[in-house]
Image (cartoon, rainbow, N blue to C red):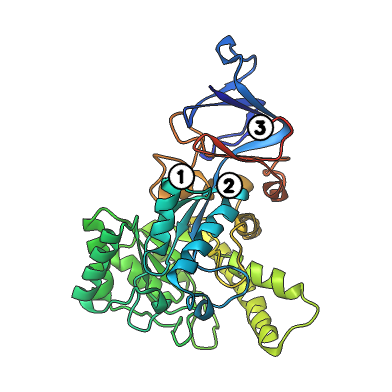
Amino acid sequence: MKTLIKAARLIDGTGSAPVENPTLVVSGGKIESIVTGELPSYLAGSDVHDHPGATILPGLIDTHVHLNLPGDGTILEDAVRESEGVLVATSAYATAKALKAGITTVRDLGAKGRTAIDVRRALQLGHGDGARVVACGQAITVTGGHVWYLGGEADGVDGVRRKVREMVKLGADFIKVMASGGGTVGTQSWNPSFSQAELDALVEEAHRFGRKATAHCLCARSIEMAIDAGFDQLEHAGFIADRTGRQVYEPAVADKLAKSGIPVTGTLAVGGAVLRELRGRETLSPTDAAFLARWENAAAQNLLQFRKLREAGVTFVAGTDAGWRFTRFDDLPLEMELMQEGGMSAMDTIVAATGYAAQVIDIAHETGSLKPGLAADILVVGGDPLADFAALRDVRLVIQAGTVKVAYDANA
Ligand SMILES: [Zn+2]
């Protein structure tokens, strides 16, 4: 039996102009066609979801999450003290939360051991509802480097090659590398972590096995080194200059990044979520007050740098860093609002969270846009997100591979 979804408009995720008064036809778990005007007679008797005034979109893609982490303010060091069994359960719950928000695919950028890989498998087996998972296994990091607790430590050219092979053996869809320090206690976000020879070997080895490689970069030198190594993508692309966390934007590095054509995940939601949570509290501990003050500054700086990088010609996909501190698994609309605030058009931002995101993370042949033959991963929201992204939080219907997962409509 075919399923028909009717709404006021349809945005297909490719950047094409919206289709007015569409009927999206789903059959056998896949998108069959988009019909406008009178319904052809062969569609009579289909299961119909009619959403007047609403918008049909591809299911959203969050290109940067950490399923192991709860996103409730818990710091990494505490979260990863739990057993791997707890982390698997936490991760499965995270994929369910994302799916409810219309995020039908998440890409995990580093989990402990094989926990994210195992959750991906359980969902593939049909054991529970959750966003489809694309996973790197563990993020590869230097000894004592950013998120080393997850098990991804490797050093030296031979050591990093071996680690890539371990991740491929584990079933990694892609390879994630911590090219600078980060929010992990004792690491240096203002310095590159690996040598150039190690980064070159990481990328070469990932590509040998047909995996894309992405690099977490919080300082300018790490961005330059990652470009030279030939990474396929960058995460964050920060310009932290010293241990105070001060950022110093470098136009020459931005130009080099733009010329490379390497897309970046901005993760602006991290700062946005900290501000939402801590500004909303009546009282703050001295630690939280200091944390908020630091992020008031960092969030503004990150937004400004996002704007400048785009003006320089750098392209972005939407990714939240969900799980990290206060960033929730339904926070992709927050990321999209911030991207728009940083100068991106509503349509470009939607494409960055659907069709372009799928292309960058190598799943465009399966999902990401509403093209015939692709998986029927569909989100219907009330209102028009092109006019106001608040519509993205008014979830009416979520369909994943043709199966209704969330329905707030009367006739579902
Ligand atoms: Zn991350």
Q: Residues within 10 Å of mark 3 (few under 14, many from 20)?
A: many
| Residue 377: image location, x then y, percent | 52, 39
- Judging depth in this view, the residue of 306 and 254 nearest the camera is 306
Cα distance in 3D space between marks 2 and 1: 28 Å
Q: Residues within 10 Å of mark 2 (few under 14, many from 20)?
A: many
Return the residue at label 2: 350
Return the residue at label 1: 126
Contact (CB < 8 A) between labels 3 and 2? no
Q: Is residue 288 above or below residue 122?
A: below
Which of marks 1 and 2 precedes in the sequence? 1
Frontmost of labels 2 and 1 is: 1
Where residue 9 is drawn, which disc sits there? 3
**Disc 3 residue lies near ligand 1 with CB under 8 A:** no
Cα distance in 3D space between marks 3 and 2: 14 Å
For image coordinates 31% across by 78% down, the residue present is: 194
Can see residue 215?
Answer: yes
**Disc 1 residue lies near ligand 1 with CB under 8 A:** no
Circle 3 SS class: strand
Cα distance in 3D space between marks 1 and 3: 31 Å
- Judging depth in this view, the residue of 111 and 24 nearest the camera is 111
For image coordinates 71% across by 44% down, the residue present is: 387
Name of the residue lying farthest toward the top: 41
Which of marks 3 and 1 precedes in the sequence? 3
Residue 198 image-quadrant placement? bottom left
| Residue 401: image location, x then y, percent | 49, 37
Q: Amino acid at mark 2?
A: Ile
| Residue 282: image location, x then y, percent | 81, 78
Give the quadrant of the C terminus.
Answer: top right
For image coordinates 67% across by 26% down, the residue present is: 21
Q: Is residue 70 above or below residue 347?
A: below
Q: Amino acid at mark 3?
A: Arg
Circle 1 SS class: loop
